[in-house]
Image (cartoon, rainbow, N blue to C red):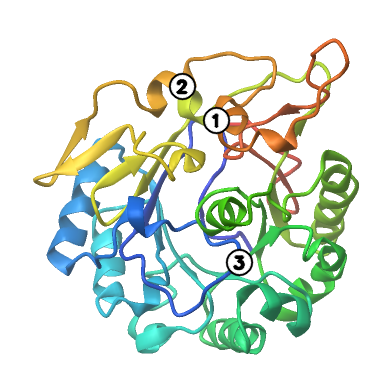
Amino acid sequence: MTAPPTVAFSAKAANLFFHILTRCNLRCRHCYINPAQHGRAALPLERIRAWLALFAAHRPGSNVIFLGGEPTLHPDLAQAVRAARALDYRSVTIDTNGYLFHDILAKVTPAEVDYVSFSLDGATPEVNDGLRGAGSYATCLAGMRQARARGFATSLIYTVSRANRHELAAMPALLKDLGVRRFFIQVIGIRGRPAQDARRAGSGPDLQLTPPEWLETVPAVAQEAAAAGVTVSYPQVYLADGEVFRCAGRVAHNFFVFPNGRVYQCPLCEDFPLHSYAVRGDRLVARGPITEREIFTLDIPEGCVMNRLVQPGNIAYAPDGRPLHRVACCLLKAEVGPDAEGSHPGAG
């Protein structure tokens, strides 16, 4: 059976990552939300509808992903989903921690939502709950099973860090047991709470994997999950010799929209007022320099410019000053699995 359409992380992709609120019931160690930059408001339904229409006109055929915080905390999420469907978005996804507030699965249908995407950061309660909060593992698995029982296609997001890297290898079997169709492996970003914690501690981040740790773990697990029938997307992170660096800000159309009207094209920029656009009076307005748009134009030996600026600790150099690994764009991902046919970053 053909999988429903979902968010694409490739060249020419068009995705609207729509944060309809920033409030959450959990306090995950790696949460990227920064209320000082993203605001604390929940968008009213009429504003959600207006902004959905705005981006549907700006980039027809986009995928929309409803995010928070925890988007199911928003009492009007079901109406927002129906508004997106009426505007002919290519696919509609709800990203959730699994608590599924306001009985959301009873208020929308599988015909209206292409994927319900769950966040889980451990193959066991001990590891996941240490990162996301007590009881979150059991609640998330119960939510996934409930979604599957109601006929929803489900995907799972796993943010890999030093705290849970050792459990990634156990995920393919769990994915198969849960009936998950797609698996998104994420790299932890030093933004939001991890960046704030590092500044308070006066030291570098302790959660990011080193290049050997990432390269020894993630691609192999992705292949194992694909062999089990799951389509897997994961960031390449480190480019091999001869591979060309490409920035999604140049070749794709990703918009990360926050309740205060900020619109970013690169998630690494979100701790700073570098957003390319702002929504003002329900209009999309390009901001003047300097924004992330100017940063996208730069070419450096390290690859991703924003990575070099905000999290340089994951770059190592040879004695002659050359970077040992160039960092790839986190939004252009490798994809393997039965529906992916071995596609790679930048595939159309």
The spot of residue 233 in percent (x, y) is 67, 50
Residue beneath disc 1: 306
**Does residue 344 appear anywhere in the picture?**
no
Marks 2/1 in contact by CB < 8 Å: the verdict is yes
Which numbered disc, 3 or 2, marks the residue closer to the eye?
Answer: 3
Secondary structure state at the residue bearing disc 3: loop
Q: Amino acid at mark 1?
A: Met
Secondary structure state at the residue bearing disc 1: helix
The spot of residue 27 in percent (x, y) is 52, 73
Alpha-carbon span between mark 2 and mark 1: 7 Å
Disc on res. 295: 2
How busy is the neighbourhood of tag 3: few (under 14 within 10 Å), some, or many (20 plus)? some
The spot of residue 342 in percent (x, y) is 76, 41
- Is residue 180 placed above or below 32 in the rendered structure? below
Alpha-carbon span between mark 3 and mark 2: 28 Å
In the drawing, does residue 145 fall left or right of residue 196?
A: right
Disc on res. 29: 3
Q: Earlier in the sequence, mark 2 or mark 1?
A: 2
